[in-house]
Amino acid sequence: SSDGSARDGIGSMTREQVFEEISKIDFKKPFSNEEKTKYFDEFQQTLTALQEARTTVAKEGERVSPFLYRPVLTLGSIHRDVGNFERAELAFFLAHELVPGAYPPLGNLGELYFRHMKDYQKAEKYYLMAVESPGDHLDTYYFELSQLYRFFLNDEKRGEQILIDGETKYSDNTSILALLALYYRETGQTEKALSRYNELLVKDPTSQVAQRALEELKQ
């Protein structure tokens, strides 16, 4: 269940303990004073928003707990950006627990594990959960999954198949089709690339990506 997966990262901590932990900021990377000030200001504003949301939930009860989601998600992104990956992880899991159907916490966990914590099995798990529902970043998640399989899990076939699966599941998303066409082009499978770029042009006759690729491939 989604609650179970949220508890993967939070473990036995109570929500109060998570709030306490993610309400502290430590810069784990070198930053200029100007950059630190920018992050610190954003952090303080987000903490204020979180405090207001917590006050509302305390007054009105658990049914308004989704009000906590946005500030918690933002805190996670700030922790990631300043290099505190464990706190980012906690915040993203809490955001997922607050709104289980939302894809951004899952995509953020995928990226955190893939690009920062180098835990490729967990990256795969959360990216796959993120692409279960339609959203703005599907093409990014599918691209990252394909890269993960091809270059980090050494599974070229899976790297191709995940793009095929994505294109089939979200056939109206031409960005995923463009990724699949590019995959074939980059791996020297010219016939398949031509076929997919032609398919892209049928779905989106104004696609400059498809037009340019077809011209270059036919040379």
Image (cartoon, helix red, strand yellow):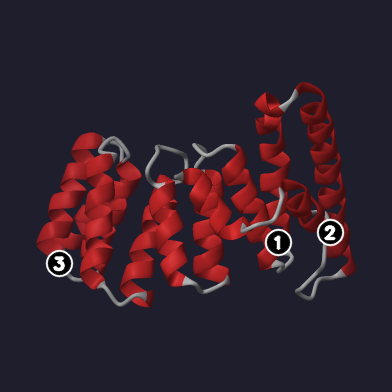
Q: Secondary structure at mark 1?
A: helix
Vertical placement of residue 168 versus 53, above or below: below
Residue bearing the label numbered 3:
189
Marks 1 and 2, the one that precedes in the sequence: 2
Q: Foreground mark, 3 or 1?
A: 1
Q: Residues within 10 Å of mark 3 (few under 14, many from 20)?
A: few
Residue bearing the label numbered 1:
87
CB of mark 3 within 8 Å of CB of mark 1? no
Q: Position of residue 155 (x, y in %)?
A: 26, 73
- Identity of the residue drawn at 77% across and 22% down: 60
Distance between the alpha carbons at the discs numbered 3 and 2: 51 Å
Going by the numbered disc 1, the residue's amino acid type is Arg
- Identity of the residue drawn at 14% across and 64% down: 190
Q: Residues within 10 Å of mark 1 (few under 14, many from 20)?
A: many
Marks 3 and 2, the one that precedes in the sequence: 2
Q: Nearer the viewer, residue 167 or 28?
A: 28
* Quadrant where the N terminus is found in the figure: top left
Q: Which mark is residue 24?
A: 2
Q: Position of residue 85 (x, y in %)?
A: 66, 66
Q: Position of residue 165 (x, y in %)?
A: 24, 50
- Identity of the residue drawn at 43% across and 53% down: 140
User: Is residue 210 in view from this perspective?
Assistant: no
Going by the numbered disc 2, the residue's amino acid type is Lys
Q: Residues within 10 Å of mark 2 (few under 14, many from 20)?
A: few
CB of mark 1 within 8 Å of CB of mark 2? yes
Going by the numbered disc 3, the residue's amino acid type is Gln
Q: Position of residue 44 (x, y in %)?
A: 87, 48
Marks 3 and 1, the one that precedes in the sequence: 1
Image-quadrant location for residue 50: top right
Q: Is residue 170 left or right of residue 82?
A: left
